[in-house]
Amino acid sequence: MKHHDTIEELLKAPEGEHYEFKEAKNKYEFTEVLKYCCALANCGGGKFVLGISDKRPRKVVGSAAFDQPERTKQGLIEKLRVRVDFQIYEQDKKRVLVFEIASRPIGLPVQVDGIAWWRKGDSLIQMPSEEMQRIFYESDHDFSSDICSGATINDLDKNAIDVFRNKWAVKSGNKRIKNLSIEQVMTDCGAMINNELTYAALIMFGTSTALRRFLPQSEIIFEYRSTNNAGAAQQRNEFRIGFFACYDKIWDLVNLRNDKQHYQDGLFVLDVPTFNENVVREALLNAVSHRNYRMSGSVFVRQYRDRLVVESPGGLPPGVTVNNILEIQSPRNRLLAEILALSGLVERAGQGMNLIYESCVKEAKSLPDFKGTDNFFVKVTFNGIILNKKLLLILNKIGEEQLENFITEDFLLINSLFYDQKIPKQILELKNIKTNIKKLIDIGIVESTGRNKYLLARGLYEATGKSGVHTRIVGLDKETNKELLVKHIKSNGKKGTPFKELQQVLPSHSRKQVQILLSELKDEKRIKLEGKTNGAKWLLV
């Protein structure tokens, strides 16, 4: 499929898996656009055309729908998590709007509110379970979708299923789910295939007896330790039962010893819990959905007074490293991830780690520490103590409304600048980071001091009483810098000063910045250049 079509090509294009036409003369519901674009993505990508009739012979009728297509594009990207672009055409003063939808990721169906939409003729339907299974098998083999021979519906915990069914009904807005039989619920969510249970069914809903028999390594162990000393924990709870039966219980155990850190600066008052509920829950979801169930070993949640350590067997999923963990999405157990997405516990497989990083920055805590992670085990430490309360003041100065529009890279950039005044290489190499930095500069949160050199805006330093730090980092003003150059040239007298030496006077400036200052001094007839190329030297006039 071509990236762009002409109006004539659109009129001749076959409506099918890759094209959808709607007249939408005045308006069109965004929710319906979402469904059709979801189906297009699941069928390999395509184009959603507004303003052209769908019946042949097609005609350009014009559409006034979505007068801010950029905003609509962003809404589609946020919901579908695939690349979206748009084109606007005009014929005889009639507007045609085309949204171009990229194909779904390998091994993952695209979903809208827990439903993977699919095309069947001219109709939209929920993706057939066999098609979903085929997608799951596109990349690495998904153990969670394998059939567990010998397991029956009696091996499932009804309470765990009820928790899931209620969450699914709320997430999808479909109250009828609450009245479905257990067999139908298991079939519809993909946990049962052709009346046989998958390992995902046991991991999510299995009874203690069934897991002990079929999958004894599917276990979560919680420990509380008041000190770092080796030996028995002060409290230990073992959960070998379906995840939906113990998910809330594990958070309740953590929250029993969850102190609050009080901070007040003038009218600004904040109570920050040592253990953020969203971070703890997301860490647990990641451990359960990404661990390797073919390896022995349990998931461990170890709580200390000031930190939480989550360990899971199997190492990071293929292709994922500590450096690219925010960019690469590679769920090891795709069926588990999809069941969790249906329940609303995760919006999309692989997005939980972004939420964790953002929460750590918002609460001025250390970023997740992966020390101890290797090819066989993932170990993540979440430190609960506020590192620097001044960062909370800066975030308060930015404002909650502004922060809601931030993406993970924005939080990481602000965090890096606050502590180090420099940006780590792995952040600079993130996709679209330059665009994100420009956006922060435009709204007055970040300032540029040179190539790949940035600092927080002066107003944010003032909020913490450190405007002097801003001045020190920015350096002296232009006229003072010019006087420094003149002073050095004067000290060398008639022998002159080469350009390389003048660069040493202003080491924080780029070559081009120094050249601009010298050019201004020359125009002011204060200095002159004698000689050419490498032998050229600057002297006083």
Image: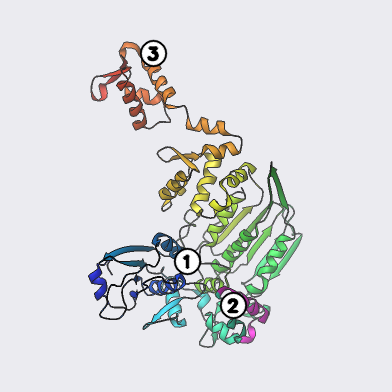
Q: Is residue 394 above or below residue 166?
A: above
- Label 2: few (<14), some (14–19) or many (≥20) C-alpha neighbours in 10 Å: some
Residue 381 picture quarter = bottom right
Residue 224 picture quarter = bottom right
Residue type at mark 1: give it: Lys
Q: Is residue 6 above or below residue 145?
A: above
- Label 3: few (<14), some (14–19) or many (≥20) C-alpha neighbours in 10 Å: few
Q: Which residues are magenta?
A: 146-171
Residue at 47% of width from left, 29% of height from top?
Answer: 475
Q: Is residue 490 above or below residue 209?
A: above
Disc 3 target residue: 491
- Quadrant of the rendering where the C terminus is positioned: top left
Using residue 448 as the reference point, say whether residue 50 is left or right of it.
Answer: left
Residue at 57% of width from left, 73% of height from top?
Answer: 171
Residue type at mark 3: give it: Ser
Using residue 392 as the reference point, say whether residue 113 is left or right of it.
Answer: left
Q: Residue furthest top?
A: 494
Q: Which mark is residue 456?
A: none
State yes or no: discs 3 and 1 in contact (Cβ < 8 Å).
no
Q: Is residue 3 visible from the viewing direction of this image?
A: no
Question: x%, y% of residue 151?
Answer: 59, 85
Task: State the CA–CA distance, disc 2 to disc 1.
Answer: 19 Å
Inspect the magenta stretch and tell me whether residue 165 lies in it.
Answer: yes
Sequence order check, earlier mark of 3 and 1: 1
Sequence order check, earlier mark of 3 and 2: 2
Regarding mark 2 in the picture, which secondary structure is present there? helix
Residue type at mark 2: give it: Ala
Task: State the CA–CA distance, disc 3 to disc 2.
Answer: 80 Å
